[in-house]
Image (cartoon, rainbow, N blue to C red):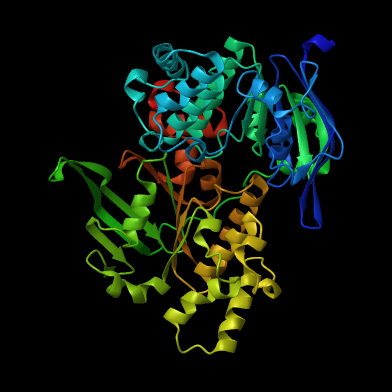
Amino acid sequence: MSDDKTLLKVSDLSVNFRQGGKVTEAVKHISFSIQRGQTMALVGESGSGKSVSALSILKLLPYPAAEHPSGSVLFKGEELLDSDERDLRRVRGNDITMIFQEPMTSLNPLHTIEQQIGEILQIHQNMSESAARERTVELLEQVGIHDPAERLKSFPHQLSGGQRQRVMIAMALANKPDLLIADEPTTALDVTVQAQILALLKDLQNQYGMAILLITHDLGIVRNVADEVCVMQHGVIVESGVTADIFNNPQDEYTKMLLDAEPGGNPPETDYSAKPIMVARNLKVWFPIKRGFFRKTVGYVKAVDGIDVMVREGQTLGVVGESGSGKTTLGLAMLRMIQSEGEINYNGLAIENYDAKAMRPLRKDIQIVFQDPYGSLSPRMSVRQIVEEGLLIQEPDLGYEARVKRVASTLEEVGIDPATMDRYPHEFSGGQRQRIAIARAVVLEPKFIMLDEPTSALDMSVQAQIVDLLRDLQTRHDLSYIFISHDLKVVRALANEMIVLRRGNIVEQGSAKQIFENPKEDYTRALMAAAFDIEAPDEGIIEQ
C-alpha cells in the first residue's frame, strides 16, 4: 500500500525497564504498520510485551524508568517518540485513543458517567456543558446503552461489566479518533457480552473509518475481527501476516502452540450410578433491597431462586451462565459460606442449619479454589505456609516434618517444584499461583471441591494445563467438582453434568454432552453461539 494509507508505522522499537542497576528488555526491535481503517492484532501470552508496545505509541510508560534504546513511532508521518508532552496531549484523546482491559479500574468511581465523558468533550472540543451532555447521550446510544439519558447520573459501580466497557468505548470514540488501541477489551467479560462488544467495535470502525490496534491473548477473537496479526513472544514478533494465512498455515512453533492451546480432552466417564455427594433442594438466596431513612425492605434480589442441584461422587457438575446469573452465589450457599433457605445434604448429612462451628470439621472434605489466584493467596505468607495452613487447623497432631513432607508431595503433584516452597506468591506466574491454590485445597485430601472460575484469569495455554491437572487429580483421588464458569470451552472439557443459570433460575439441566450437542433452550443456544462462533438463534436473547 502507498504511504498515504499508512496511519501508524512502528520501526525497530525496543523498550527497557531500569530498576536500580538491573535492566529488563521488555520489547526487542519490533516493527509493524497499520493502514487506515485496518484492524491489526498484537497476540501473545502475559509478559510477551504486547501492552508495553502499545503504551509506547503514546509514551504512556512510567518514564524515566522506561527507556527506548532504539525505535521510531510515526503517526501520520509525525514522530511520536521524540514529541514533547504538549504535542502528545494534542494526539492523545483526539487522534489516538485507548480502551483498557478492566473498565472498573479505568473509570473514576467518584464521577458519574456524564462527568467522565463530558470532561473529554469539554477539554478537547471546548463544548459547553449542555452540548457535551447532548453529545454524551448520543455516544451512549451509539454504543448500545439502553435509556442513555437515564444513565448519565449513574456511577461505574451501578453498571454491569458489559455496560462499563461500552462507556469506555464511548469515551474513546468521543473525539472520532483515527486509531483506537484496544488492550484486552473483552477479557473480563462473559462470552455473550464479549461477542457484542467485538461486533460493536467492528460496526463503529466501519462508521468512523478508524484503524484498530487490538491487543489480546485470545486467538479466537483475532480470527473474527483482525485483518493482520503480529504474534509476540518474550518481547519479539515471532510471526506476522494476514490473519487467514497465520491461522491456516502458521510457521512458528509458538504460533502453533497458541492455536492448539484451547482446553481439550473429555471429562472422566460419566457414572449415573455414582452416589450423590452434594444435593440441594429448593435452594434460595434472596438479598433484601432496603430503602429510606429506616432502611425498610422494599423488595429482594433473587440471586438463587428455588434451585435443585446434585453432584455425584467422582463427577463434575458444570454451572454456566453470565455474570449476575447466580453461579457463585449457588456454590457459596451449597458450601454454607452464605445464608440460604432450602435443603443442603452433604454425604448423607443435612447441613442446611450448620453454623460456622458445626461446619469446621467438614471443611477438610469440602474445599474451594477461587478465580483470582493472586487475590486469594496471602502475599505475606510463603507457599509452604499457604499450603500447610489447613493442615495446622484440621490435623493439629501432624508433626512439622510430616507436614512439610505432605506439602512437598502435594506441590509436586500439582506441578510445582517443592524446592520453591519458601518463596512468596509474587515470585510465581499466574498459572503457577493457581496450581498453588489447587495444592492448598488438595493437601487436605478433600472429597468435594468448588472451583469458581479457576481459569478465567489465565492465558489460553495455561488454561489448558490447569484443565488437564484438574482432570488428572479427579481421576487419581476420585474427587467431585462443582465447576463454575462462563467459559463453555473449559466446561466442555471437564463437566459430566451441567446446569445453565439465568437470573437465579435454571434454564437448562442435564448431561453436559447432550446440552453441548443439542441445547434445547434459546438462551443456551445463544451462549453456545457466542462461545463457539456459530449462528445465534436471536440476538435479543442476551441483554446488553
Q: Does residue 200 appear in the picture of this structure?
A: yes
Residue at position x 45%, y 83% from top? 395
Is 495 on the left-hand or right-hand side of 430? left
Q: Quick check: 346 above or below 517? A: below
- Residue 540, image x, y percentages: 39, 21
Where residue 532 appears, x then y in whole percent?
56, 33
Q: How many marks?
A: 0
Q: Tell me the residue at 63%/77% (across/down).
A: 408
Near-viewer residue (155 or 382): 155
From what the image shows, is residue 423 above or below residue 271? below
Q: Is residue 510 left or right of residue 95?
A: left
Q: Position of residue 117 (x, y in %)?
A: 47, 23
Q: Is residue 259 visible?
A: no
Query: What x and y, as percent, mark residue 367?
Result: 44, 66
366 to the left or right of 241: left
Q: Quadrant of the N terminus?
A: top right
Q: Residue at x 59, y 75 (%)?
A: 384
Asked which quadrant contains residue 62, the reply is top right
Quadrant showing the C terminus: top left
Q: Residue at x 72, y 21 (%)?
A: 227
In this picture, residue 260 sits left or right of residue 402: right
Which is nearer the eye, 491 or 236?
236
Quadrant of the image occupied by residue 72: top right
